[in-house]
Amino acid sequence: MSKIKKNIRTTLVARLGAGVLAVVTFLFVAALFVMFRFSHQTIEEEAIEKAMHTLEGTSQHIDNILHEVEVANRQMLWNVEHHLDNPDVMAAYSRQIIKSNPHLLGCAISFEPHYYPEKGDFFSAYSYIDKNANNLVTTFDPTILQPGEYANVPYVGHNWFFIPKSVNGTCWVRPHVPSDTLLSNTVTCSTPIHDKEGNFVGVLASDLEISKFSQPVLATKPFPNSYCAMLGVQGTYIIHPDSEKVYHRLISEVIKDEPEEVDSLVASMLAGESGYKAVHLFGQDSYVFYRPCNDKHWSICIVCPESDIFGANDRLISYMIILTICGLVLLSLFCVFFIRWQMKPLKQLKEWAKQIADGNFNTTIPLTQRSDEIGDLQNSLGTMQQSLAAHIEKMNQVSATLKERNEALQRAHEQVVEADRSKSVFLHNMTEQMQYPTQAIYTIVNTIREKQMTLGQEKIETLSKLMITHTKAITRLLDRILAMSQQKGPTLADILKEETDTY
């Protein structure tokens, strides 16, 4: 890694390639991010619209079926309430409502305890279709409405009876009966019965076979692995593709190990709200689309795994990432080779510049026909090299001339020095030769000055002749010196001029 970093810092090709790759990578990642965000949002919106539209159609279909039963109950309720004084007619009414509505499996017209004393503690006229015998059966036995664990509980304690009594209105309930009984696959539309004074006296309960509307619900699959379910107002499953979860299973028991967000979802559904939530349900991330039906007493939902909604998009993103990585690898290789090819002349220019820097000014830099910056740089470097070579050549010539002149000056200086030395030696010799006669004259003059009174004429003449002799000797020496000084020997200027004229 450190070697790569060092190569990037010291190599222009690596820096250019890294820069281009960084910019392109940023643009690719930004484009992928924007595409993913917008595609994810678009797919989510389309999924919501599709699921909610499907739910609306299914809910409308169920509401139509339920509405038919409610209308049948209301129509029959008028007859029942106007003939409360005749309990025997109630069996005919229960049979008539089943015959007029093919969706119904049974109908019970049940009354409060002791409402008809002559009929015993409980009176209920119950008609139902016996599928084994394929005929319509009517019974007044109230215990048939108390199966299984409710065998010892009178029907007035069952939810299909006490709930409409409590709310004083028509409601749909799920009967609490064993899964192998007649009513195990039914829902009940319970309508309270009132007397002329408006007092509650009983319940008109029509049993609708769930299969009448479960098939459209279970067939609702807007996505390949999605499924549709329906919850009752008590929080029980009315319809679910898993039969084990349907009968007497509260949804709170099914989702007890799920996250709290699932509890919020169930609360919204039981409150009759409409919408969707993204939750982790039964081990996978899912979208749950829900809306109320049956006048908000039930809630229908579509559970769809995220993979169904975003699977294709995720695969597309994966392919795009793979293609992007491959593209970046190919782009990086292309950048390296292309930039290296484009920078090859710069490498040659670097070698030429290094040779010039090492003093090889005669390096030949050919002119190029390239019209880009590198071509201009090569031609400029070639022109500079030629100018520099010519200048260096001229400098070498001037240097050689200066060297020759310096040598001439040196020789002239030596000649002048030699001439001065010769004159100095000559003057020194002359001075030594003048020393004796001068000393002799000095001695004679001192002798005459000191002994002039005692010297005779003859002695004085002798000394005078001797002094004249020494004076003449000095005069001859001075003449020679004067003659020497008057000789015109070569001066330094003459020698320099002579040396200069030779070039």
Image (cartoon, rainbow, N blue to C red):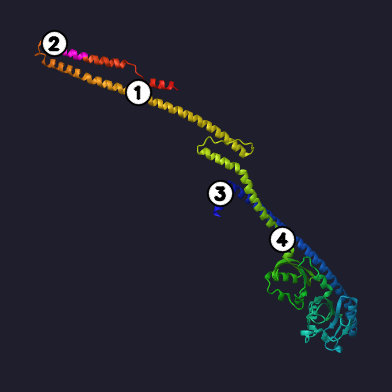
Name which of mark 4 and mark 3 comes first in the sequence: 3
| Magenta segment, prevailing SS (helix, strand or loop) | helix
> Is 195 on the left-hand or right-hand side of 10?
right
* SS under mark 2: helix
CB contact under 8 Å: marks 4 and 3: no
From the viewer's perspective, is residue 96 above or below residue 274?
A: below
Residue 491 in view (yes/no): yes
Give whichever of 127, 374 is nearer the camera: 374
Q: Any magenta on residue 499?
A: no
Q: Give neighbour class at mark 1: few <14, some 14-19, many 20+ (Cα, 10 Å).
A: some
Q: Which residue is mark 4?
A: 315
Which residue, given by chain and number where applicable, does mark 3 sit on? 9
C-alpha separation, residue under disc 4 versus residue under disc 3: 39 Å
Kindly indicate the quadrant of the structure image that contains residue 261. bottom right
Image height of 184 relative to 217, above or below = below
Q: Which residues are magenta?
A: 459-472
Which secondary structure lies at badge 1?
A: helix
In the image: residue 474, left or right of residue 214? left
Position of residue 246 measured from the top left corner of the image (x, y, whole percent): 77, 76
**Number of the label disc, if any, that sits on residue 492:** none
User: Residue 274 lies in what quarter of the image?
Assistant: bottom right
Residue receiving disc 1: 416
Q: Amino acid at mark 1?
A: Val
* Labels 1, 4: front one: 1
Q: Which residue is mark 2?
A: 461
Q: In which quadrant is the C terminus drawn?
A: top left
Residues at marks 4 and 2 touching, judged by CB atoms closer than 8 Å = no
